[in-house]
Image: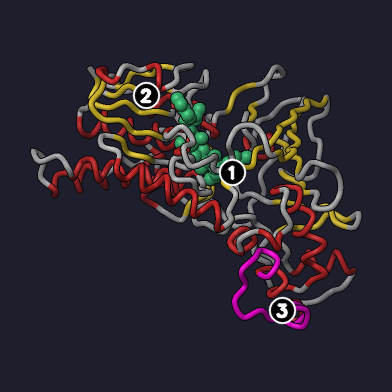
Amino acid sequence: MFDHLVVGAGFAGAVVAERLASQLGKKVLIIDKRPHIGGNAYDRLDEAGILIHEYGPHIFHTGSARIFQYLSQFTAWRPYEHRVIASVDGKLVPFPINVDTVNVLYGTDLNEEEVEALFRDRAEPIAHPKTSEDAVVSKIGRELYEKFFRGYTRKMWGLDPSELDASVAARVPARTNRDDRYFTDEFQAMPLEGFTRMFERMLAHPNITVRLKTDYREIDAGEYREMIYTGPVDAFFDHRFGKLPYRSIDFRFETHDVPVFQPGAVVNYPNDHDYTRITEFKYLTGQVHDKTTVVYEYPTADGDPYYPVPRPENAELYRKYKELADQTPHVRFVGRLATYRYYNMDQVVGQALATFDQIARSRPSLEISDIDRRVSDVDLGPADALQPPKRGRKSAAA
Ligand SMILES: Cc1cc2nc3c(=O)[nH]c(=O)nc-3n(C[C@H](O)[C@H](O)[C@H](O)COP(=O)(O)OP(=O)(O)OC[C@H]3O[C@@H](n4cnc5c(N)ncnc54)[C@H](O)[C@@H]3O)c2cc1C
């Protein structure tokens, strides 16, 4: 008999399982229908011995010291600041758009104020931007929107930006400085030995049993008291209101017999080819190897559920499932698929820690002050792991 069945061994499931076992002494069974732990963050060595991310490139970044410190118990870190290049009009330019993007693209030598003025002149004022097209055009004008956003969004979502929520494009702003980092969070780093090794350490507690290649419907309800469910919420309720739409990606890996394939970790192709981007893993992992592996991403409508499609009618459909979920006793819904939201890894860790807090607080025999201490006083990792990476440091490709 287990206290908890945790369905899904990704970030959401692994964090809740680890906390329940290590902080409350609970016996936890964690299962996944896949043959591995780590969920979409799973990484492994490929046939050539190169560390790859099976479900597309995952870069860790967070503004939360608490989340970074929590994960630092299970991994040391490799400082890494992510940079993305876009291939536009036959030129390779920094993305998100910044001062250098504009200058390389137009062969100009504008300073920060002049680029700000250029964006202002070109912006088409829209009082309340509703769609992704509105969000971008109202900031930087139609020409840059068409060069960088329109084609990429159409490939990525199979929808025109005018059909998508403003929030989709708002995630990737244009900048009027020379900052060419993709993320600006205080903590940006990759787990030194990879994500899977970090998950192995999280789940190594003696109170945790891991079962792979197992669907939760195969587990007898008599085996556990409470379920933490991190799979798709619509599947849990047999899609009774209809399927929640997801965008999927067909990942195609290639290993090349050269140490370096492209000039940066990620090159975006907003306007050419059927794929959206190519990622070269060695930039992310720092691995030194004579060969290199890259992945091409071809967005598709079918396949594993990766990205919830952000449209008002889908939010409405999810609301119906959420109502059902809220009324379902002894099951908690946590994570990206169970709450139908695009969450980054750190946000899912935060959500999982909050769920643990709720479970811990609902136990009558423990004092709240005791729980607060257990939840927040996580051991810190090595001192240097907590330092945000130095600005301007380039990641080394072998
Ligand atoms: C292509 C791509 C790139 C991304 N890049 C980044 C990035 O750079 N940085 C970042 O912070 N985030 C990134 N993310 C987001 C990141 O993957 C998620 O935030 C994180 O993986 C969510 O964790 P989770 O546990 O909620 O879900 P998942 O990792 O999806 O885990 C859920 C698990 O539940 C299992 N499951 C589902 N149904 C069942 C069932 N019936 N029975 C048993 N098991 C089941 C699944 O097999 C899965 O392993 C990216 C996502 C994608 C798709």
Q: For mark 1, what is the residue?
A: 245
Residue 262 location (% of width, % of height) = 81, 41
Going from N to C along the chain, the mark reached first, 1 or 3, is: 3
Q: For mark 3, what is the residue?
A: 116
Q: What stretch of residues is rendered in magenta?
A: 116-134
Going from N to C along the chain, the mark reached first, 2 or 3, is: 2
Q: Residue at x 91, y 54 (%)?
A: 90
Is residue 263 shown left or right of residue 66? right
Q: Nearer the viewer, mark 2 or mark 1?
A: 1
Res. 42 image quadrant: top right
User: Tag 1: Cα neighbours inside 10 Å, few (<14), some, or many (≥20)?
Assistant: many
Q: For mark 2, what is the residue?
A: 30
How far apart are the two marked residues, 1 and 3, measured between alpha carbons? 38 Å
For residue 165, say whether it is visible: yes
Amino acid at circle 1: Pro
Amino acid at circle 2: Ile
Q: SS of the residue at dot 1?
A: loop
Asked whether disc 1 touches disc 3, contact meaning CB atoms under 8 Å apart, the reply is no
User: Tag 3: Cα neighbours inside 10 Å, few (<14), some, or many (≥20)?
Assistant: some
Q: Nearer the viewer, mark 1 or mark 3?
A: 1
Decide which of 373, 235 is in the foreground and name it. 235
How far apart are the two marked residues, 2 and 3, measured between alpha carbons? 51 Å
Is residue 64 shown left or right of residue 135? left
Residue 191 location (% of width, % of height) = 51, 36
Q: Residue at x 78, y 25 (%)?
A: 255
Viewport quadrant of the N terminus = top left
Going from N to C along the chain, the mark reached first, 2 or 1, is: 2
Q: Residue at x 45, y 49 (%)?
A: 347
Residue 98 location (% of width, % of height) = 72, 66
